Image: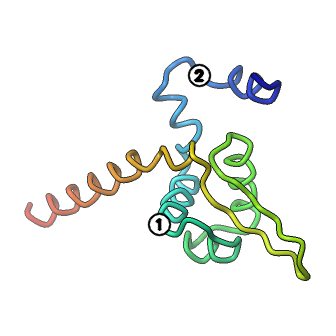
Amino acid sequence: MSKSSQKILDTLPECPVETTLALIGSKWQTLILRDLLANEVMRFKELQRSVGGISQKVLTSNLRTMEEHGIIHREVFAEVPPRVEYSLTPLGKSLQPIIEAMRIWGESYKESLRNG
């Protein structure tokens, strides 16, 4: 185990549900995951437009955190101007069932409100 992995592990809660929430529990991180699951690879501005309502600073912070946790891969291309693309790692892709379950539940909830 690398030192960085051990450092992250040491900061995570004992409860697995809390651990998951610590990694994707913010509104922004969940929406970033949703968009990368749907699009596979996105550039910064594409993500910012897609997520909507997120500032550059907050998006940058969330992407860095998710990268540190091994959920997102950031690739920088040596071009002028530099091009940066974001994608999910295999670990990030493994969150797909959770995001899908949230989508299904949200649809069901809205439907239950419509049918009163």
**Residue 38 bears which disc, if any?**
1
Mark 1 falls on what kind of element?
helix
In this image, 62 relative to 15: left or right? Answer: right
**Which residue is identified by label 2?**
13
Q: On the rendered image, what quadrant is the N terminus found in? A: top right
Please, is residue 2 above or below residue 46 in the view?
A: above
Mark 1 or 2 closer to N-term?
A: 2
Amino acid on which disc 1 is placed: Ala
Mark 1 and mark 2: span between their CA atoms? Answer: 29 Å
Q: Residue at x 35, y 51 (%)?
A: 102
Q: Residue at x 63, y 76 (%)?
A: 46
Give yes or no for contact between labels 1 and 2 (Cβ–Cβ under 8 Å).
no
Q: Residue 115: image x %, image y %?
A: 8, 64
Q: How is the image coloured?
A: rainbow
Please, is residue 5 above or below residue 74 in the view?
A: above
Residue placed most toward the observer, 98 or 91: 91
Q: Residue 71: image x %, image y %?
A: 62, 46
Crowd around label 1: few <14 · some 14–19 · many ≥20 (10 Å): few
Amino acid on which disc 2 is placed: Pro
